C-alpha cells in the first residue's frame, strides 16, 4: 500500500463528496490533511477521520474565490503542519439551472467560472510558493470532468470551466517542472455526491446506460488515483488529465 507518512496534503472542497473521499484516502495512507471549504465537516466525516491513527486532519474555513482567505488558509496549514507537499484543488460547483443560450444568465455563468477556474488558480497561486519553499518538490492536482470533452446542453459554463482546468494543468506543469512540482488533473465521470444528487435524474440514467459495468462512481473510486498522484511513484507523470469514469468515455 502507498505510504504518505510525513507528507501534508491540502484538499479544497474536502468536507464532502469527491474531496472528502480523497481526504480520507490520503489520511489512510498516512498523510496529514488540511481540508479547506466554506462549510464545516459533518459528524459522519469527522468520526471517520478520528479512526485514522498517526495522521491528522484539520478543517479550515476558506472560500477559494477569496484571495485573502486562501492566503490565510495556507498560513494556518503551515502553522499546523509546517509544510505542504500536495494540493488537491478540487472545490467546484455546477450551474444550478439549465438555460438555453438565448436566455443565458451571465452572472450564473461567471459564478461557475469563478469558483471552478479562478478558485483553482487562486489556490495554486497561494499554495505553490509554500511547496516551493519546502524545497522538496511536490504535487498539484486539479479536478476536471469528462464533461470537458463531452459538453452539456444548456449548461456550457461547467464543461468550459473544466476545459480551462485542463489547459491550466498543462501550463502549470510546464511552469513548475523546474521546481520539481508535477501538475495533473483527475477527470471523474459521474460520481454520487451532493452535486449529482441535485442534477436531473436523467443524467444518472444516461451515464449508467453507457458505463460498461453499469455502476455509477462513488468518491472512493476516485480516491485511489489521488493517493497515487500524491506519492513518489507518480513522479514522472505531469501535465496529464487522467480519466476515472468506469469506462464511460470509451462507450
Ligand atoms: P459536492 O457538491 O459534493 O462538493 C463540492 C465541494 O466544493 C464541497 O466540499 C464544497 O464545500 C466545495 N466548494 C464549493 N464552492 C467552494 C468555494 N467557493 N470555496 C471553497 N470550497 C467550495 O461536489 P463533488 O464532490 O461532486 O465535486 C467535487 C469536484 O469534482 C468539483 O470540482 C466537481 O466539478 C468535480 N466533478 C464532480 C463529478 C461528479 O459526478 N460528482 C464529476 C466530475 C467532476 P462548501 O460548499 O462547504 O464550500
Image: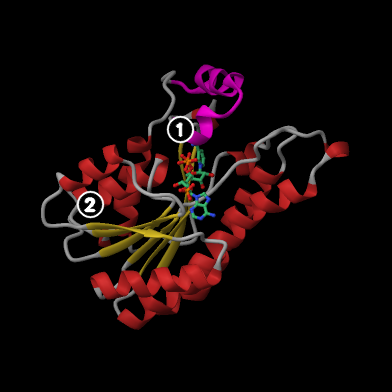
Q: Position of residue 22 (x, y in %)?
A: 34, 47
How far from the left and from the top, in percent, is residue 47? Answer: 21, 41
Q: Is residue 246 above or below residue 107?
A: above
Looking at this view, name the residue that lies furthest to the left: 53
| Residue of label 2 | 27
Q: Give the quarter of the figure containing the C terminus.
A: top right
Residue 191 circle label: 1
Q: Indicate the quadrant where residue 122 lies.
A: bottom right
Q: Is residue 107 left or right of residue 165?
A: right
Instruction: Residue 59: give x, y in percent of width and height.
Output: 33, 57
For the point 39% across and 47% down, the residue is 19
Residue at the (20%, 59%) spot, across then down: 4
The total of numbered circles placed on residues is 2
Q: Is residue 193 magenta?
A: yes
Residue 177 visible: yes
What residue is rendered at 61% in x and 23% in y?
Answer: 200
| Mark 1 Cα-neighbour bin, 10 Å: few <14, some 14–19, many ≥20 | many
The CA distance from mark 2 to mark 1 is: 21 Å
Q: Quadrant of residue 34?
A: bottom left
Q: Main secondary structure of the magenta part?
A: helix
For the residue pair 175 and 10, the one nearer the viewer reads as 10
Q: Which residues are magenta?
A: 191-212
Nearest to N terminus: mark 2 or mark 1: 2
Q: Nearer the viewer, residue 116 or 134?
A: 116
The vertical placement of 63 against 223, above or below, is below
Q: Would residue 173 be visible to someone looking at this image?
A: no
User: Which quarter of the picture shows residue 216?
Assistant: top left
Q: Up-down: is 222 above or below 184?
A: above
- Badge 2 local density, few (<14 within 10 Å), some, or many (20+)? many
Asked if the residue at label 1 sits under 8 Å from ligand 1, the reply is: yes
Residue depicted at 41% across the width and 20% down the height: 213
Place of residue 6 in the rendered image (x, y in percent of width and height, measured from the top left): 18, 66
Amino acid at each position: 500500500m502507498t505510504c504518505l507518512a510525513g507528507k501534508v496534503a491540502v484538499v479544497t472542497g474536502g468536507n464532502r463528496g469527491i474531496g472528502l473521499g480523497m481526504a480520507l484516502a490520503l489520511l489512510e495512507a498516512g498523510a496529514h490533511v488540511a481540508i479547506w471549504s466554506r462549510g464545516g465537516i459533518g459528524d459522519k466525516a469527522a468520526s471517520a477521520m478520528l479512526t485514522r491513527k498517526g495522521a491528522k486532519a484539520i478543517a479550515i474555513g476558506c472560500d477559494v474565490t477569496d484571495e485573502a482567505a486562501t492566503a490565510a488558509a495556507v498560513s494556518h496549514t503551515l502553522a499546523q503542519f509546517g509544510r505542504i507537499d500536495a494540493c488537491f484543488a478540487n472545490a467546484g460547483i455546477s450551474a444550478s439551472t439549465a438555460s438555453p443560450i438565448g436566455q443565458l444568465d451571465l452572472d450564473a455563468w461567471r459564478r461557475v467560472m469563478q469558483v471552478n477556474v479562478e478558485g483553482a488558480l487562486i489556490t495554486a497561486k497561494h499554495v505553490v510558493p509554500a511547496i516551493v519553499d519546502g524545497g522538496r518538490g511536490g504535487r498539484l492536482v486539479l479536478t476536471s470532468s469528462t464533461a470537458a470533452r463531452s459538453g452539456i446542453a444548456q449548461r456550457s459554463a461547467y464543461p468550459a470551466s473544466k476545459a480551462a482546468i485542463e489547459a491550466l494543468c498543462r501550463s502549470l506543469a510546464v511552469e513548475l517542472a523546474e521546481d520539481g512540482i508535477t501538475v495533473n488533473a483527475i477527470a471523474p465521470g459521474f460520481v454520487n455526491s451532493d452535486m449529482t444528487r441535485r442534477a436531473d435524474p436523467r443524467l444518472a440514467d444516461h451515464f449508467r446506460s453507457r458505463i460498461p459495468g453499469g455502476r455509477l462512481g462513488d468518491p472512493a473510486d476516485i480516491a485511489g488515483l489521488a493517493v497515487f498522484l500524491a506519492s513518489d511513484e507518480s513522479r514522472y507523470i505531469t501535465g496529464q488529465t487522467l480519466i476515472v469514469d468506469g469506462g464511460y468515455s470509451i462507450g
